[in-house]
Image (cartoon, rainbow, N blue to C red):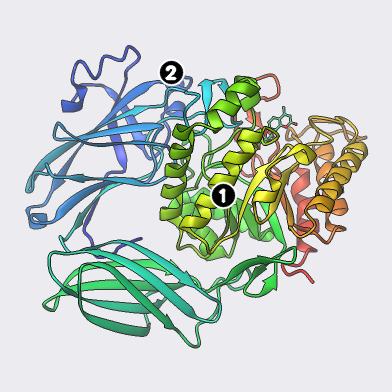
Amino acid sequence: MKSWFRPKIILDGFWSFKIDRDFVGDKEEWFKGFKSSDVIYVPSSWNEQNPEWDQYTGVAWYQRDFYVDKLLEGRMAWIIFDGAGYKTSVWVNGKFVGDHEGSFTQFKFRVDEIRFGAFNRVVVRIDNTPSIYSFPPARKLNETAFDFFHYGGIHRSVYLEFVDVCHVNDMTIHTSHAGDLKADISVECNKNFDARLILMDKERTEIISEDIVRGVRPGLLRFERRYDGVKPWSPEEPNLYVFAVEIYVNGVLRDSVYERIGFRSVEVREGRVYLNGKPVFLKGFGRHEDFPVTGKYVPGSVLVRDFYLMRKIGANSFRTSHYPYSNEHLDLADEFGFMVILEPPLCYSGLDRLLSREEVAKLFSSEEYLAKAKKFIEEMIRQHKNRPSVIMYSVMNEPPSDIPEVAEAIKKLAEFFKSIDPSRPVTFASHRSVRDLALGYVDVISLNYYRGWYSEWGDIDKGVEVMINEVEEIHRRYSDKPIIITEFGADAYLGLHSDPPQMWSEEYQAELIKKYVEALTKRSYIIGLHIWNFADFRTPQNPLRTILNRKGIYTRDRQPKLAAQIVSQLFNSIPTYMK
Ligand SMILES: Cc1cc(=O)oc2cc(O[C@@H]3O[C@H](C(=O)O)[C@@H](O)[C@H](O)[C@H]3O)ccc12
């Protein structure tokens, strides 16, 4: 939910910073304010801003002063973090305002201690100590269940928002491609209010339709209507509209919020995913939020380049592997017409290197694990539920789902997704192939395959043959379910060439991708292909990686490898709509 009406103070910029290696900050009450000559930029992870902080995991403190105008007096102040972590605790003017766990969702705290017409001080404590109980789990910086670098810090924007006592709390919007809209609008107010509900064009220059509901009691306002003549949102024509809600008390405007929406429908039936009643084929990538120096913050200009590159190469889809991406990232997906599979930070690719089978079973069957997973999922859905681009949810990535307790947890979490948002299909990215026990619990089967890389290495044809045999077997078992191959690929070091194609060369990567795509597009039950990965990204240090995971078809600074040309030919020849 956005607002152009609520006054804001943006806190992005340079902050004071202090690493707390000996964990003395709490005892020395740094939350009241601390002295430090270290400077840090927000938004961005701390690691690459100074080589001395690069390998640091633990507690670090941020501090910044800001001025609040007297004119804002009487409004409630909220401090909003678009993403920081792993654990964040916040104090304003020495008073604790709240804490939050998880790096990739927006969170906010009410601040009662604001001084109007004066300077205020915000102090933030970040703790990114690895833990097996974190989402996703890790033991140490280089012993993680996930294959991306464990950055720390305030890596998305921070701002204050000033809100009237009468305000919109939340808004859930469902649409159809026929022009139907249903909105559940939760309003807090000390009086009955009037609501003005406006549908506008994307630029907010033209009002398409407006409705006024008078004398509404505070609580839930349900609004439902059909807008005739609106254009549907689709990959080829991502028509966006603005749906705005204004709250009036005695004729005075007290709040105004909006969402950018698209009119579209998603359903899964008879082995297909239908968008607006037409079966779609998802062509695209697993991506990451990762960039040199800024770490887990990807600047808007880089995102824009990514979307133009993805569009040019013929992609129409990506998965937010392996955590929910920033608002900016997903705003561009809405804008460019990308079909997104939204994934929470439940990533378990290397979990069996950290825990025994028994420990994994115990973890996944514990009530604590399920409750925490649900909290992460709920926050993610709340933030992104109104996006037309989000057409599917992925419960998690590469769980050890050949273990019955893990399969049971996937079943429960898939049901949980549906209980909050029954409008979108659910999947999870499996790497257990024919041994997976949870494939039957989701609407769409997603499979990750590295045959020809981690196994059958050096022999692409053999890798493709084994992969196809397994995919066919899975299709035989679940013939009514559509299948997406959510990861496949090979590392390539830019500039390393080899004839014949050998591992790590650009030729090997291009050839493996080409052979996978050719073999898989012959199978009509395959409804999507996501190459791993769009761009190279930083990883923990281990013998399989050369600082970066190099499975990007672009380098980390977004220059093409040979595979980008091949993928362009392949993707541009696959239509978005299937027969
Ligand atoms: C060592 C290894 C073997 C294997 O068969 O699969 C596998 C998968 C891994 O993680 C997934 O694949 C990507 C990759 O390895 O490039 C990761 O970057 C991605 O996050 C994972 O979904 C890791 C290691 C292995």
Where is residue 423? Give x, y as percent: 53, 64
Does residue 533 appear in the picture of this structure? Answer: no
Does residue 284 appear in the picture of this structure? Answer: yes
The amino acid type of the residue labelled 2 equals Glu
- Would you place residue 203 above or below residue 569 in this image? below
Of residues 399 and 441, which is closer to you in this image?
441
- Please name the residue that numbered disc 2 is placed on: 52
Contact? badges 1 and 2 (CB < 8 Å): no
Of all residues, the one furthest to the top in this rendering is 22
The amino acid type of the residue labelled 1 equals Ala
Dot 1 or dot 2: first in sequence order is 2
Of residues 495 and 314, which is closer to you in this image?
314
Query: Which label belongs to residue 414?
Result: 1
- Would you place residue 366 above or below residue 467 in this image? above
Quadrant (top left, top right, bottom left, bottom right) of the C terminus = bottom right
**Is the CB of the residue bearing disc 1 within 8 angstroms of ligand 1?**
no
What is the spatial separation of the Cα atoms under label 1 and label 2, in whole angstroms? 42 Å
Where is residue 132? Give x, y as percent: 50, 24
- Would you place residue 529 above or below residue 336 in this image? above
| Ligand 1 position by quadrant | top right
